[in-house]
């Protein structure tokens, strides 16, 4: 976090604008220092750290079950998946045997989380491009998933449903019925999203060919998730390194090769369909069994290093734990997807207009607390 | 290529490197002097092809400061962990790998911010989150009487 | 048909009998001024309410529904709030220009409304170059927007103002040319004559395809000229926070706000007057019975219904389309609308020359 830039015109005779930290389209407290030639963006310098909470340092003094509730606050839109990452890492370290019921429920919850995150993406992306109506439709449908979460977990957005060794509580008796109702409803609604935004000629003109990210750059910059897959980077952890119940479902990894804003958008729209497929395959086959296995009351990981990757709605989340055999991690590192994804912004939005910068920034789908941690 | 073959291959790359097969990944320990050349080899060698740096973490090992690089090859799908540590706590220096993997530029800035490891040849080494007057909070000897509560 | 001319004539005679001609004119001016101001404020308030309701229904919401029946008094409550709210002083702004800008914007729209015929014999001034006057006066508003952007000493405002300048200057051409197409058909620039000319059918029907094209072009160009979505680049909420009026608060902001809605109302009025017959009821050729029935609906109602139909169209655009980018906006004007318009004028002239119109 540095001092605000106060010059109006910099040494290259470019007009300097501090976009953010309070700005409608930076989706949080991100500050972009733009150098403009007229309307054309010549340089973008992201300044981060406005919601830095020193999470990694905090984790060093708390126990593993407590860490789970902190990870909710990183990428709050895929809170459940973040929890899962820590739980999986802890369970892997303890070599705990996890019953199928837990795996299946975790997978269903993760996919619902992914759908609601992409719904919010659709809503805010439409708003970034000036189509305010999208926002309300996106949030209307997201509400239905949040209601399902509320019934089962008590929380709506930040669910804290996982705990090492399983889940906090069993699913609500209505869970299966309501999820099936939602899938049926959302399959009908999703084409409406396309009618309102995807097919719109202005929308296509605004997004096609804008902010092209090549495959080499995507890999070199470590861009994962739908953003990377739109550039053809096959990086779906669910496919390459299946965790939970992903090895027992059939689904396609959404891959495009164009890598422009439109395809980043399209990748997310497709992923909602894929997620619905996954949920449909699992929702009728939740095995019987306990919803949590009993671990030791105080969890101490054996000495060593553990790395667990999961696929959040934004990309690859890595949890790297170094344990010294204590009940706190010696060092924990969260490799958050948004932190890596953010830095292509300068690369791909240079020489486009301000309006394109907003569209590109929206299509990266950044969550600022995930960057700062 | 399974992990045994990969370890063999890696041993042949650099004499200084200590290659061990861990539970999850093959691990390489490399002294700071050989870090940059080994990193370049790992990326450019046909058989290894580690082109995706998916995690870069700075670690305070107590007496040493180190950096852990998690690498993956998008072509072969295998992963490796590269570790390098320096015992100089006052002015710790490691080579930057930012020109090999672009994402390292920003992860290294984060490590510099939180652990104070200076990366030589880094294009733009500035602090990320914290003001320049702050210390390096992820170091184990960092003290902050106000914000850190320690259990006695 | 209802004619307001006898009423206005009677008031004129009464005043002239009561006082000297000079004072009579002064009193008449005052009456007209007060009436138009009242009308202006009422329509402005209602439009804000209408927009909120329309956009709410398009977005699956209810819109204002607490203050008064159906939330009708919500905008009045908002107006009171805007009147009472503090005017935030801007430290490095150019004070004089900063304060002047909203007045220029609102005066421009206020002047334009004077020439619009609301009903037969009901208009403040019936200039023989009515259309020319409206175009000229409504274009003045851009000066206010440019001043607002410049004087605010805010980078977003400046970009917004520059965009607005480029946009309005370009789209002024299309608005003018599409109206000229209709002037050729009508043979006059006087708005009352244009309306009278539509007694046997509205111009949009009489003028074959060119009139229809002109209507579409006018609709697009006037939406752009009033800085409304999808052409609201000067405000561009997601890019420039609020564009040229970022720094304004209280009543000065309310002026910009009101002027935006009134500009929309004015262009809708012009569209209704020139293309849809203004206050003229819906007449079909020689169907005397049908025409007589239509005449029973008062002309003012016709005028308001048509205007609000066009206003609704513009709201519909705004709430369904994403925003254009500045280069796309200018491409649309200079590469598509302007050539179409030029050809359209020629075709219309040819049609009128050959007497092929109805």
Image (cartoon, coloured by chain):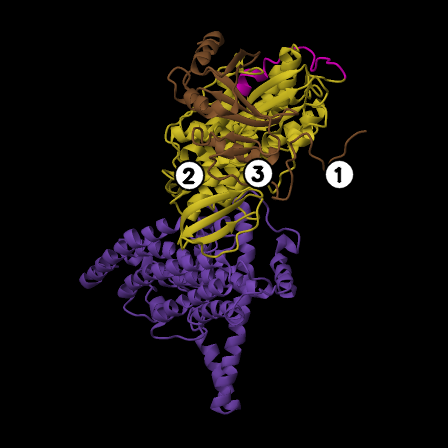
Chain colours: A yellow, B brown, C purple
Mark closer to the observer (3, 1): 1
Which residue is found at the position 64% from the left and 13% from the top?
A101
Q: Secondary structure at mark 3?
A: helix
Residue B32 is situated, as x and y percent measured from the top left of the image, at 52, 25
Q: Is residue B7 above or below residue A177?
A: above
Work out whether mark 3 precedes mark 2 in sequence or the reverse, and give the earlier one: 2
**Residue C239 in view, yes or no:** yes
Q: CA distance from mark 3 to mark 1?
A: 28 Å
Q: Local crowd at mark 3 within 10 Å, few (<14), some, or many (≥20)? A: many
Q: Secondary structure at mark 2?
A: helix
The residue tagged 2 is: A347
Magenta stretch: dominant SS?
A: loop
Which residue is found at the position 48% from the left and 44% from the top?
A45
Identify the disc placed on residue A368.
3
Please state if A54 lies on the left or on the right of B44 as rendered.
Answer: right
Please state if A51 lies on the left or on the right of B75 as rendered.
Answer: right
Mark closer to the observer (3, 2): 2
Chain letter of mark 1 equals B
Q: CA distance from mark 1 to mark 2?
A: 41 Å
Corner quadrant of residue B109: top right
Magenta segment: A278-297
Q: Is residue C199 above or below residue A209?
A: below
Same subunit: marks 3 and 2: yes
Identify the disc placed on residue A187.
none
Same subunit: marks 3 and 1: no
Corner quadrant of residue A94: top right
């Amino acid at each position: 976090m540095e001092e605000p830039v106060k010059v109006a015109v910099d040494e290259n005779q470019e007009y300097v604008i501090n976009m953010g930290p309070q700005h409608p389209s930076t989706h949080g407290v991100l500050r972009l220092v733009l150098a403009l030639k007229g309307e054309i963006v010549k340089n973008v310098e992201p300044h981060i750290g406005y919601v830095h909470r020193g999470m990694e340092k905090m984790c060093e003094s708390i126990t593993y079950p407590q860490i789970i509730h902190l990870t909710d606050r990183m990428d709050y839109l895929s809170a459940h998946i973040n929890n899962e990452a820590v739980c999986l890492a802890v369970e892997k370290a303890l070599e705990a045997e996890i019953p199928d019921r837990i795996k299946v429920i975790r997978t269903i919850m993760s996919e619902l989380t992914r759908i609601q995150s992409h719904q919010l993406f659709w809503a805010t992306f439409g708003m970034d491009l000036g189509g305010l109506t999208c926002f309300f439709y996106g949030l209307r449908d997201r509400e239905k998933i949040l209601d399902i979460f509320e019934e089962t977990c008590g929380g709506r957005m930040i669910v804290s449903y996982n705990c090492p060794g399983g889940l906090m509580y069993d699913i609500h008796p209505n869970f299966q019925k309501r999820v099936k109702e939602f899938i049926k409803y959302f399959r009908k609604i999703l084409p409406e999203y396309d009618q309102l935004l995807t097919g719109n000629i202005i929308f296509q003109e605004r997004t096609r060919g804008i902010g092209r990210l090549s495959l080499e750059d995507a890999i070199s910059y470590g861009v994962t998730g739908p953003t990377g897959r739109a550039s053809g980077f096959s990086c779906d952890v669910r496919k390459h390194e299946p965790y939970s119940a992903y090895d027992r479902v059939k689904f396609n990894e959404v891959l495009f090769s164009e890598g422009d804003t439109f395809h980043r958008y399209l990748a997310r729209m497709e992923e909602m369909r894929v997620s619905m497929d996954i949920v449909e395959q699992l929702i009728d086959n939740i095995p019987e069994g306990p919803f949590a296995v009993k671990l030791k009351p105080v969890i101490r990981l054996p000495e060593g290093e553990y790395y667990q990757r999961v696929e959040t709605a934004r990309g690859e989340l890595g949890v790297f734990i170094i344990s010294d055999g204590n009940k706190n991690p010696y060092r924990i590192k969260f490799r958050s997807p948004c932190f890596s994804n953010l830095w292509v912004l300068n690369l791909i939005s240079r020489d486009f207009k301000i309006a394109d910068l907003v569209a590109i920034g929206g299509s990266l789908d950044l969550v600022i607390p995930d960057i700062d941690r | 290529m399974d992990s045994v073959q990969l370890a063999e291959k890696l041993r042949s790359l650099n004499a200084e490197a200590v290659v061990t097969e861990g539970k999850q990944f093959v691990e390489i320990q490399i002294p700071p002097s050989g870090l940059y050349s080994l990193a370049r080899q790992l990326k450019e060698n046909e058989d290894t092809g580690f082109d995706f740096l998916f995690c870069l973490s700075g670690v305070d090992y107590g007496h040493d400061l180190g950096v852990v690089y998690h690498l993956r090859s998008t072509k072969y799908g295998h992963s490796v962990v590269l570790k390098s540590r320096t015992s100089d706590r006052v002015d710790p220096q490691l080579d930057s790998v930012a020109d090999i993997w672009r994402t390292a530029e920003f992860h290294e800035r984060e490590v510099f911010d939180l652990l104070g490891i200076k990366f030589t040849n880094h294009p733009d080494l500035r602090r990320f989150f914290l003001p320049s007057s702050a210390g390096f909070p992820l170091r184990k000897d960092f003290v902050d009487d106000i914000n850190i509560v320690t259990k006695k | 048909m209802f004619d307001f001319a006898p009423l206005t004539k009677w008031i004129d005679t009464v005043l002239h009998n009561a006082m000297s001609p000079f004072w009579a004119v002064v009193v008449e001016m005052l009456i007209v001024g007060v009436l138009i101001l009242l009308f202006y404020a009422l329509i402005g308030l209602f439009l804000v309410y209408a927009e909120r309701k329309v956009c709410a229904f398009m977005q699956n919401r209810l819109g204002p529904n607490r203050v008064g029946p159906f939330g009708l008094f919500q905008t009045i409550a908002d107006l009171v709030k805007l009147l009472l709210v503090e005017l935030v002083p801007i430290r490095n702004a150019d004070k004089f220009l900063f304060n002047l800008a909203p007045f220029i914007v609102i005066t421009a729209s206020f002047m334009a409304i004077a020439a619009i015929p609301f009903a037969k014999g009901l208009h403040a001034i019936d200039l023989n170059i009515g259309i020319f006057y409206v175009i000229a006066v409504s274009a003045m508003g851009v000066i206010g927007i440019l001043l607002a952007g410049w004087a605010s000493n805010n980078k977003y405002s400046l970009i917004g103002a520059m965009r607005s300048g480029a946009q309005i200057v370009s789209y002024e051409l299309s608005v003018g040319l599409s109206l000229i197409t209709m002037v050729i058909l009508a043979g006059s620039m006087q708005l009352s004559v244009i309306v009278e000319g539509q007694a046997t059918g509205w111009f949009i029907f009489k003028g074959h395809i060119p009139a229809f094209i002109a209507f579409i072009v006018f609709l697009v160009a006037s939406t752009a000229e009033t800085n409304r979505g999808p052409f609201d680049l000067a405000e561009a909420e997601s890019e420039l926070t609020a564009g040229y009026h970022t720094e304004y608060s209280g009543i000065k902001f309310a002026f910009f706000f009101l002027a935006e809605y009134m500009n929309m109302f004015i262009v809708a009025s012009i569209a209704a007057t020139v293309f849809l017959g203004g206050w003229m009821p819906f007449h079909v050729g020689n169907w005397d019975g049908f025409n007589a029935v239509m005449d029973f609906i008062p002309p003012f109602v016709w005028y308001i219904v048509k205007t609000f139909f066009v206003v609704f169209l513009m709201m519909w655009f705004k709430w369904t389309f994403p925003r254009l980018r500045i280069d796309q906006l200018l491409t649309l004007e200079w590469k598509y609308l302007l050539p179409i318009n030029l050809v359209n004028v020629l075709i219309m002239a040819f049609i009128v020359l050959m007497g092929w119109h109805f």
